[in-house]
Amino acid sequence: MPMLEVKHLVVEYPGPVRALDGLDLTLRRGEIVCLLGANGAGKTTLLKTLCGLVLPKEGEIRWETPNGQRPRLGVLLEGSRAFYWNLTGWENAAYFAALKGLPEDSLDEHLEELFQLVGLWEARNRLAGDYSSGMKKRLSLLIALLGKPDLLLLDEPTAGMDRVSVVEFEEYLHRIVQEEGIGILCATHLLSFAFTVASRMVYLEKGKLKDWEWSSLFGRHRRAVFLLAGEIPQKTAEQYKPYLQDFGQGRWQLEGATDDKTIFKALEELIVEQDLDLLQIYGVD
Ligand code: ATP
């Protein structure tokens, strides 16, 4: 049985705005599901509904726990007001750990592990209000990770992070999923991140989920263009020559017809196996 099963979820905001319109979703232990979709598609609403901040109008949310209650959730939502700006990073973490009821005897060890992990160890005694936006994001993430949750709900976790941190974070997500067997549902606009971490990608459109399909990104456009950064080995560059243009200094353009599957295969290979960054995507006629 999946750890989470959502059936026909409907959420309406005053207006009325139908933010979720009969959404179905399952998530299993050990799975990282990335949620993609245009602005306003309903990604944040879904995450807020799962953690109980928004009440659905219709539908069902089933948890696999023995009593059907929500499992231990770690939640990272958008915005940087998730902690106290006049406390240090460490004080914030200790405060939220106490709120979560984490045992005090192993707390220092747990916090040190997390501060090292998110790369804030050196800055742990600085005021959180003085952190840069990327550091604030990492502190929010650290707070979500307190107490090793069963399910992580992440809204744009990499926004504001530099490239090195994104790579470390990708590795960490793989590790906790493998070692702890937790589930992760993660809304993101960063395709290269989604490709690297996801066991499954789903696409949200007007409050409904669809399986990931490249065509969903390009609408009526007949050609897809991707701007990439990084090194491409000569053999791979040769293999995809008709599609690739070298702009020099590690910048590449990959272009092809949206109904030609080779271009998407090439893209997946370049960003997952060759670790190129995806800088931009657009459709042209
Ligand atoms: P983004 O990628 O921009 O973060 P999203 O996919 O997370 O977008 P939501 O924030 O879930 O989308 O919004 C879904 C729809 O619900 C949008 O039309 C939005 O305007 C509307 N909406 C979201 N929050 C509220 C609210 N508090 N009151 C009224 N409408 C809302």
Image (cartoon, helix red, strand yellow):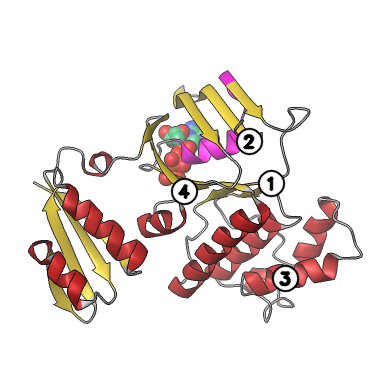
Residue beneath disc 3? 113
Disc 2 versus disc 3: distance between alpha carbons?
27 Å
Q: Secondary structure at mark 3?
A: helix
Q: Is residue 98 magenta?
A: no
Amino acid type for the residue under numbered disc 1: Asp
Residue 109 seen in the current view: yes
Q: Is residue 166 left or right of residue 284?
A: right
Tell me the quadrant of the picture where the N terminus can be found.
top right
- Mark nearer the viewer, 2 or 3: 2
Residue 270 at what x, y percent from top left?
28, 65
Q: Is residue 211 left or right of residue 82?
A: left
Report if the CB atoms under discs 2 and 1 are less than 8 Å apart. yes
Q: Is residue 96 left or right of residue 42?
A: right
Residue 14 at what x, y percent from top left?
51, 24
Disc 4 versus disc 2: distance between alpha carbons?
15 Å
Residue beneath disc 4? 199
Disc 1 versus disc 3: distance between alpha carbons?
18 Å
What residue is at 14 percent from the left and 47 percent from the top?
260
On the image, which quarter does residue 50 sit in?
A: top right
First reached walking from the N terminus: tag 3 or tag 4: 3
Q: Classify 238 as above or below 149.
A: below
Residue beneath disc 2? 3
Relative depth, front residue between 145 and 13? 145
Amino acid type for the residue under numbered disc 3: Glu
What residue is at 59 percent from the left and 38 percent from the top?
48
Report if the CB atoms under discs 2 and 3 are less than 8 Å apart. no
